[in-house]
Amino acid sequence: MGNLEATPTVTATDDFDPDQDCERLHDAMDGLGTNERPIIRILTRRSTLQRQILKQRYEETYGEELVERLKEELKGDFEDTILAVMDPPVVYDAKQLRKAMRGPGTNDEVLIEILCSRSNEKINLIRAAYAELFERSLADDLRDETSGDFKNLLLAVVLAERDELFDIDEDQAEADAQAIYDAGENRWFGTDEDEFTKVLATRSYLQLRIIFEKYEGIAGNSFEDAIDAETSGNLHDAYKAIVYIAKDHFGYYAQKLNDALRGCGTDDDALIRHVVGRSEIDLGNIKDRYEEMFGKSLWQDISDDCSGDYKKMLMNLLME
């Protein structure tokens, strides 16, 4: 997953004073109009844990929920970003998964982004949060809302059985690469997707990189070429996402952010999801990778694409 130390852009503030923060937030929303500036300043400079303390302290002090108060005062993409930072990340992920599967059609891209990139621990916490929030099983909803080999992959990933050790087994990598070659490009007819899924859903990212190298030696072309040749649609996209994350996960998120900002309109849901979701993990690294890949800064692209308090909120989350 890369050798660089992860650099967040949002960290806990050392001189945290929840009473003072709550008073400032309350004053910002009191009376006619809302003073968005202190809301942005406070909520982008506190960690997730500190924001949870603020929610509790605000309700104790003012007798109403901070999140409900913010909802009353704010609107649009700015409100969505504020609400995103107020949720613990696994709760936010659970809500995004439910939203992706609710109503007609399913947003496969969101399912792939979240489920194919989280650690075993995170996936287990997301499953628990999903059950608590919606009184339904994430696995059951995935069974109902997806189908075929794509469904099988997501269900395998949701089991959270990926090896997370740092050991490398060259022989096993060779065997896995051969098995995938025999299940796909070396097969006379059709593809055995189960073999691809088993390896991509359970091997460590470090081990996957060795498997990709071995595969190239056996097949004479890249693992990505095999995915392109043997699969299509949402399964193809999910496999490619896992490969990208294993090889260069900073690059994966830089690409996702660029996709959200490119084209006619901005995909604000995706932009919020990635900026908020990575801000306390590795957004500093992703910013650097973005500039390497696209020759311009993420800061500048967001500045050009967004406006108002929404833009200010994102800019504050990007600052280290």
Image (tube, helix red, strand yellow):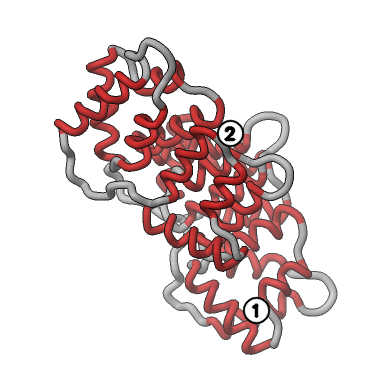
Residue pictured at 51% horizontal, 41% vertical: 112
Residue 300 in view (yes/no):
no
- 203 vs 311, left or right, is left
Which structural element holds mark 1? helix
Which structural element holds mark 2? helix
Residue pictured at 47% horizontal, 22% vertical: 231
Q: Badge 2: how crowded within 10 Å, few (<14), some, or many (20+)? A: some
Residue pictured at 53% horizontal, 37% vertical: 256
- 196 to 191, vertically: above or below: below
Residue 192, image x, y percentages? 39, 24
Residue 230, image x, y percentages? 44, 19
Residue pictured at 37% horizontal, 54% vertical: 120
- 216 vs 33, left or right, is left
- 253 to 67, vertically: above or below: above
Residue highlighted by disc 1: 24
The amino acid pointed to by label 2 is Asp
